[in-house]
Every structure is written in structure tokens, then in C-alpha cells.
Image: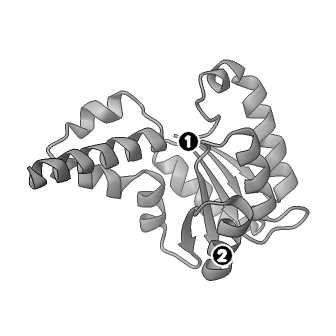
Amino acid sequence: MKILVAEDEPSIAMQYEIALKDRDHDVTITYDGVQCLEAFYKELEKNESAHKARRPPFDAVILDYRMPKKDGMEVAKEILAIEPKQRILFASAYVVETLVDSVRSLQQVVELIQKPFELDPFLDLIEDKGIFSELEKLNVNVKGIKDLNPSHQQIRDLLEGLKKLQKGRAIS
């Protein structure tokens, strides 16, 4: 996965970077909202053809809620204005405030993980372990799906579609 991280605490950013790279992810670390947006735009320009295909430049953008120069919510708002399908995750000590602010500012609920947290659940969230586990319960060939390298949204849509089909069968 290609992951963009904005975290103003260097020691935390380093933990993210090490843990994500240990799982073979391509990681870009930034330390404030302005740097994050610069990295996002740079990747967007680099992959203009992917953007035209409506594939976000990163598989995930992980934002600290409170950062210098531009906070995470401002960054998320700007990114989603350009790329509405970009997956945004907030790592925040202020989960309730982040949730309320995301609904008010972004008109959507974003993925959240409350700081402090253990790295394994954090990595599982990023790597969609929960979604893949649910797909396995529905007898889906998860390896085959992973080989297609789908976006997070495509995986989520597949799971939701299969659940709807399963409900339809249960009603019939």
C-alpha cells in the first residue's frame, strides 16, 4: 500500500514509518498539514493518469487531528475536495471532537483510531484486516481479491454488496 502520514510528533511518526515499512508498505512521512498537502499534490501530479482513472494517489492518508500550520481537518477537507474517494484515517486523542468535526466539516464520518494505541490494531485497520475477515466468512477468495489490488473503497463496496445479497436470500 502507498500511505501518506501527517504526524507532528517525530517519535510517533518514526513508529508509524517503521511498522508500516516492516509490512512492505510505501510510506511518506510529513510533520504538519502543509507538508502533507505538498506531498499529496506532488503524488497527484506524478500519477495524473491514475487520478483520471479515479484512483486516489494514496491507499490511505493518516492524519493527526491537531498539527501545526494546518490541522488534520483542514487537510482532510482540502484533499477530499480534490479527491473525494481518498481514504482518510484520523489518529487522534480527541476522538469525539474529531468525529463531530468530521461530520460537520466534511459531511461524512471518517475512520478514527484513538491515541494512544497499539501498533497491531492500527496496522490491521489500515490493511483492512476486519473487512477481509468478514469476506472470508462469506467464502470469498480473499487471496484472489488481494491479487487484484483493489482500493479500500472497492473492498468495502464488495463486502456491502455481498451482505445485501445475503440478506436478500435470507428474506426469500
Q: Position of 9 compared to 155: left or right?
A: right
Residue shown at 20%/48% (left/top)?
Answer: 136
Question: Residue 40, relative to residue 14: is it above or below?
Answer: above
Residue type at mark 1 is Asp
| Picture residue at 42% right of the left edge, 67% below the top | 121
Residue at the far top in the pictured view: 49
Tell me the colour scheme of the image. one colour
Look at 66% across and 18% down and name the residue there: 49
Secondary structure, mark 2, is helix
Q: What percent of the width, then of the height, locates residue 156?
A: 40, 47
Residue type, numbered disc 2: Val
Residue 7 visible in this rendered orientation of the protein: no
Q: Residues within 10 Å of mark 2 (few under 14, many from 20)?
A: some
Q: How many marks?
A: 2
Q: Residue at 66% x, 21% y: name it.
A: 52
Residue 76: give x, y in percent of width and height: 73, 55
Q: Nearer the viewer, residue 62 or 106?
A: 106
Residue 167 visible in the snapshot? yes
The residue tagged 2 is 100
156 vs 121: above or below: above
Q: Position of residue 134 (x, y in %)?
A: 25, 54
Nearer to the camera, 123 or 76: 76
Q: Nearer the viewer, residue 7 or 154?
A: 154
Element type at mark 1? loop
**Residue 59 shows which numbered tag?**
1
Which residue extends farthest front?
172
105 up-or-down from 22: above or below = below
